[in-house]
Amino acid sequence: MALPGRGRFLLHLAAAAGGASVMGLAAGTATVTQAEAEKSPAEEGPTHFDYSGSVPSRKEQLAKLRLGTKDKPFDMLVIGGGATGTGIAVDAVSRGLSTALVERDDFAAGTSSRSTKLVHGGVRYLEKAALCLDYGQLKLVYEALAERKSLLENAPYLSNPLPIMMPCWSWFDAVYFWAGMKAYDLVAMGRTLQTSKFCSRREAMRSFPTLSTEHEDGSTLKGVIVYFDGQFNDARMAVALACTAALGGATVANHTEVTGLIKDADGKVAGAKVKDNESGKQFDVYAKTVVNATGPFVDAVREMDEKEAAKMITPSAGVHLVLPDYYSPKEYGLIVPRTKDGRVLFVLPWLDHTIVGTTDSKTDITMRPKPKEEEINFIIDEIKDLLTVDVRRSDVLSAWSGIRPLASDPNADDTASISRDHIITTDRSGLVTVSGGKWTTYRIMAQEAVDEALKSGAVTPTAPSSTEQLQLVGTPGWDRAYHAKIAQNYVVPHRQGAIDTRVAEYLSHAYGDRALRITKIAEERKLGKRLVRGHPVIEAEVIYCVREEYATTAVDFLAYRTRLAFLDTAACRQAAPRVIELMGKELGWGLWRRSAEMKKVEELLATMEGGS
């Protein structure tokens, strides 16, 4: 007798899990262990750079950028300051390469700041691997598990494990999802954060009180499957990578745009023409290798190289909403594996708020896409049946759309089926391009991109890549109790410049062991006051981010150093004047520049409130 579709899936899943585990034990694990055993201490590379000092200023970095001349080029020029670009810069400097990175806007200003904030372990790839008997999808599971582990360990203050509930509306669903997650646990072979489990309806309601027990089709909640994934602060991760690269010796410059590519007499790419978008000054930067890591814009850069270059990217838009914290508990997330149109939807706690998303639809490529009202309403309608809270449009604090740079597949009929894997290519001119991918695998993408660039033979590294165990800035002196150290010294009632306990906790998880630099500024300059009520962001952060994190505009601070713009547009608008005042004093802005900064903030917020 033929099994129903899900029955066949379970058999395939078990086979995939069992086979994969054997392969992992027989080949992968043994090979990795042997390779690691053969490494000498000198070959392993540093576990972190020297983070005791401050990053070179943006002015100093621009001056260094100009030193990349025809006679003395950089080893590598990276175009793009998102997850992949900053990751490449860190990998390159870890190998001893003289490295430059330019970003036309701010670090993570595009796709890299607009993710679901999850560090996926590849659970969704396992289903595709089983249903299609696709070993390529199974490899993605292994890759995601390894890279999730690396990300969580190398920047623990910016990331954390998160249990996620999967509601079961029938007992068949319960068995189906349980079997799938147990197969995933088996494939993971010790790389799971914790093993999955089934929880009864009563247990689920105790942990997630706003979860509805009745479905619109009349079915009732039987229980939930709980699995564990990683969660992180995406934009701050990119900023940490940029600062890590800078402290490792890289020359990094945000708000520095590539306007064209430089070629030698043989037609090989030898650098780029760049423009400092702050001053308007233009100059050339020469490099032996050039890597295009511009996310959705990789095709635009490739067209600078060759006008008729074939398209590599199929853009897909994903919309997220931010709701108040009472929509979800702080300790648990929720996943809907199948929405009405077959998508996956998450309800997640994040930075004392609730994120809901995402959609998946074809889109045009723009720097700041705006969510459509129908997309916002679609998400609201989907979660209304999941939660006991009456979900209202007026409760949406912020809404944003991000463009996923999906690697094109000519056989795909819709963007949900296009591969999330990455592609690295080298054009005839020598231009290396990285396309596709996701935050979880940024590190291995970066490593492979540098490997590809080295194939040209133009440069020779002095050390192997060490990014698998390289701790990012803010990590070496940090632990889970670091907020207590901050609070003990700086939570002093009635003292000017003092902070409160919630601020101490927030600073610890946003800045790691560099949070004490902020509290010192708060104490010395009496800037411990919150910028806006209801959010733990304080005035001293403005000064710190200008000096230590290349915050150049008010939007840089409000959107990508802190996350106010993404969390609450009204609060962001309220905080903006004080942020501009503090940045203006630090950077010497006149009245015209301050007015222009407020206008830019309003332009950003107009794309984060929906309604197009």
Image (cartoon, rainbow, N blue to C red):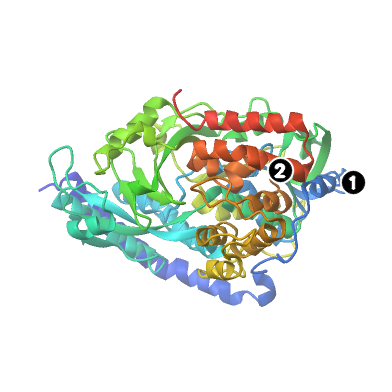
Q: x, y percentage for residue 450?
A: 66, 52
Q: x, y percentage for residue 276?
A: 78, 36
Asked where in the image residue 378 lies, by quadrant, the reply is top left
Front label number (1 vs 2)? 2
- Vertical comparison of 406 with 22: above or below: above
Q: Residue at x 72, y 35 (%)?
A: 257
Sequence-first tag of 1 and 2 = 1
Q: CA distance from mark 1 to mark 2?
A: 38 Å
How packed mark 1 is, by other alpha carbons closer than 10 Å (few <14, some 14-19, many 20 or more), is few
Looking at the image, the residue that sits furthest to the top is 612
Q: x, y percentage for residue 404?
A: 50, 38
Q: Residue at x 12, y 40 (%)?
A: 218
Secondary structure found at label 2:
helix
Q: Residue at x 25, y 43 (%)?
A: 386
Q: Is residue 553 left or right of residue 185?
A: right
Q: Residue at x 20, y 45 (%)?
A: 5
Would you say the residues marked 1 and 2 are in contact, meaning their CB atoms lie under 8 Å apart?
Answer: no
Looking at the image, the residue that sits furthest to the left is 1
Kind of residue sitting beneath label 1: Asp
Circle 1 sits on which residue? 71
Circle 2 sits on which residue? 583
Q: Is residue 202 left or right of residue 154?
A: left
Secondary structure found at label 1:
loop
Kind of residue sitting beneath label 2: Met
